[in-house]
Image: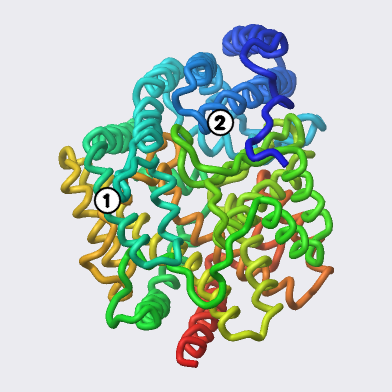
């Protein structure tokens, strides 16, 4: 079984003749789409829209294939000169389309009979939702040339700063017990069963950030300044308001979810203090013990064992999921192990062009890594459900992006819990689940509050690294309460989390809480309905790219603006905490 992913279904290399051919076709198509604005008024609206969207489809299919290849290569080697250069050239090409795309959006925004036009043509009909959203977004679109300038400046601005953060965090070394190791390796030691290893790894991680904190600090400040400036130019409100519009999500939904989470945060603080007591000390948990394994769930797994574990646990839930997981392992969709130059964390990239996905992890064999694989393969399953959509209908919004992945986590954890009556084994599994749940509640809320503060205070002046650490400390105290020893918090969490470093994707934090709670509600329906739920679930995932977040939820009879829905999901986790407390006392 391959331990690295196989990218040859995309291209065999940048010297692949197919890559060169696609690049030439892409360039020609970009030139063609740049001429589109001149045709406005010379064609009937329906004919013009068909021509414009057909060209956009072509660019989307070719561009996604090429950009994904370059990006995936770069993610496993941030010093891959060919990949970085290719990605830069592609981004330049995409920016050349900005003026024409802005012109098209303004054109759509002025069409009073848009619904009638889309209904008149089957090709346009499949893009009815997309065109309605463009009409809404047209209110915030700037002059065509200004949009082009913004897109081009982003290459050396937001995208450049994002690349800097990725490069610094993937190449920095930490001195752990006299040995230089990469950041992903030392962070993985947080799951080690030896408490001294965890403590030494935490100290080594914190110390290594001193080498890169200033460079990353400049990246964060300038990137958030760019987002604030763009919001002002567009007169579209705050970065959060702009994020919600792009997410096709109502503020009412976010407010209801956050209000419910704040009510239940003390439940998770109780869990953290109980874990600290079980580990032998009173008060808040030490940060380096957040991921300390407990119970009998201390086994390690090979990649082959992880494959068998996942397949055996998903076969009883959804056979098509198990089949896809088997393919992912057998056809080398996954890049498993950490190494120098590879980005940290984990992600999944859907590749609709070849009807596959690629998954990156930093696997070290813990049970948490099996859960991570389940999570990322949930994204792959989501990709499987949407791959039949038209090319411009393949992108789902941030909040629903974490639904299938978190649902997968719930499936595998609950299945594992149901298989044992041994209190120690159950404690290990339950504690692993609560680790993850606490992350998407306490930690995600701290990230949300931190990013809010950075956007607000960044308007007043530059935030040096010490100030950013202070803001992170305050956000973590608010999120973790007395559940964590405040003297052991992680002030540099802003350095290592790539979610903060995107000019086009702010607040990529609350979607994890959304995904966890929404998935819990969906899983509760699955328990009530059994196999009858699965067609509804697949249809719901399929609809995520052509519906608002609220309309997707309505397919499962859920009102996301009702705080009681979120409370009902949180009650599920509260029950898990109470069960853990009982087991700790045994």
Residue 236 image position (x, y, % from top left): 39, 40
Residue 8 image position (x, y, % from top left): 71, 25
Q: Earlier in the sequence, mark 2 or mark 1?
A: 2
Q: Is residue 145 left or right of residue 465?
A: right
Q: Which residue is mark 2?
A: 109
Q: Is residue 179 left or right of residue 438?
A: left
Looking at this rendering, what residue extends furthest in the front direction? 178
Task: Give the residue at x 81% y 67%.
Answer: 316
Query: Which type of secondary structure does the marked residue at label 1 adopt?
Result: helix
Q: Is residue 433 left or right of residue 502?
A: right
**Along the viewing direction, whichever of 146 and 585 lies nearer the viewer:** 585
Q: How many marks?
A: 2
Task: Give the residue at x 53% y 32%.
Answer: 76
Q: Quadrant of the N terminus?
A: top right
Residue 308 image position (x, y, % from top left): 74, 58
Task: Give the residue at x 33% y 69%.
Answer: 480
Nearest to viewer (mark 2 / mark 1): 1
Quadrant of the image occupied by residue 125: top right
Q: Which mark is residue 206?
A: 1
**Along the viewing direction, whichever of 538 and 256 lies nearer the viewer:** 538
Query: Does residue 564 show up?
Result: no
**Along the viewing direction, whichever of 62 and 424 lies nearer the viewer:** 424
Looking at this rendering, what residue extends furthest in the bottom direction? 586
Query: Which type of secondary structure does the marked residue at label 2 adopt?
Result: helix
């Amino acid at each position: 079984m391959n331990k690295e992913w196989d990218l040859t279904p995309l291209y065999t290399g940048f010297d692949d003749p197919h890559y060169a051919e696609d690049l030439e076709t892409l360039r020609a198509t970009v030139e063609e789409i740049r001429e589109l604005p001149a045709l406005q008024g010379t064609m009937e609206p329906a004919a013009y829209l068909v021509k414009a969207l057909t060209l956009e489809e072509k660019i989307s299919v070719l561009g996604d294939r090429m950009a994904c290849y370059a990006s995936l290569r770069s993610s496993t080697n941030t010093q891959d000169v060919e990949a970085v250069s290719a990605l830069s050239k592609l981004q330049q090409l995409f920016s050349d389309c900005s003026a024409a795309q802005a012109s098209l959006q303004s054109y759509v925004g002025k069409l009073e009979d848009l619904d009638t036009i889309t209904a008149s043509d089957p090709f346009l009909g499949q893009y009815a939702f997309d065109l309605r959203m463009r009409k809404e977004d047209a209110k915030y679109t700037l002059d065509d040339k200004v949009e082009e300038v913004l897109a081009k400046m982003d290459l050396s601005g937001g995208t450049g700063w994002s690349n800097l953060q990725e490069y610094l965090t993937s190449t920095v070394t930490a001195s752990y017990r006299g040995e230089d190791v990469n950041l992903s390796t030392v962070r993985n030691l947080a799951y080690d069963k030896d408490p001294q290893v965890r403590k030494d790894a935490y100290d080594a991680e914190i110390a290594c950030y001193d080498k890169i904190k200033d460079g990353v600090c400049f990246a964060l400040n300038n990137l958030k300044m760019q987002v604030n400036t763009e919001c002002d130019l567009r007169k579209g409100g705050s970065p959060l308001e702009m994020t919600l519009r792009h997410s096709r999500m109502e503020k009412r939904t976010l407010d209801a979810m956050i209000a419910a989470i704040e009510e239940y945060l003390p439940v998770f603080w109780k869990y953290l203090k109980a874990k600290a007591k079980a580990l032998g000390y009173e008060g808040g948990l030490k940060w380096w013990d957040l991921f300390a394994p407990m119970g009998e769930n201390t086994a390690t797994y090979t990649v082959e064992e992880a494959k068998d574990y996942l397949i055996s646990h998903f076969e009883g839930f959804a056979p098509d999921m198990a089949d896809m997981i088997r393919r992912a392992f057998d056809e080398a969709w996954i890049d498993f192990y950490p190494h120098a130059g590879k980005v940290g964390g984990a992600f999944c990239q859907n590749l609709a062009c070849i009807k596959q996905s690629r998954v990156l992890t930093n696997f070290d064999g813990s049970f948490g890594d099996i859960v991570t694989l389940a999570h990322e393969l949930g994204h792959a399953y989501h990709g499987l459900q949407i791959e039949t959509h038209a090319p411009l209908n393949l992108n789902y919004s941030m909040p629903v992006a974490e639904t299938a992945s978190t649902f997968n986590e719930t499936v595998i954890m609950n299945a594992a819990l149901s298989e044992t009556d041994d209190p120690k084994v159950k404690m290990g599994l339950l504690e692993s689940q609560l680790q993850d749940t606490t992350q998407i509640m306490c930690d995600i809320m701290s990230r949300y509050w931190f990013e809010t503060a950075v956007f607000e205070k960044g308007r007043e002046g530059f935030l040096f690294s010490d100030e950013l650490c202070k803001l992170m400390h305050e956000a973590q105290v608010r999120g973790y309460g007395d559940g964590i020893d405040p003297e052991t918090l992680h002030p540099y969490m802003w350095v290592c989390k790539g979610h903060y470093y995107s000019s086009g994707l702010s607040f990529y934090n609350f979607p994890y809480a959304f995904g966890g709670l929404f998935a819990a509600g969906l899983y509760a329906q699955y328990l009530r309905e059994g196999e009858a739920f699965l067609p509804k679930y697949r249809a719901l995932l399929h609809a995520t790219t052509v519906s608002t977040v609220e309309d997707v939820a309505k397919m499962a009879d859920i009102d996301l603006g009702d705080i009681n829905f979120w409370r009902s999901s949180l009650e599920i986790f509260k029950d898990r905490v109470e069960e853990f407390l009982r087991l700790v006392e045994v």
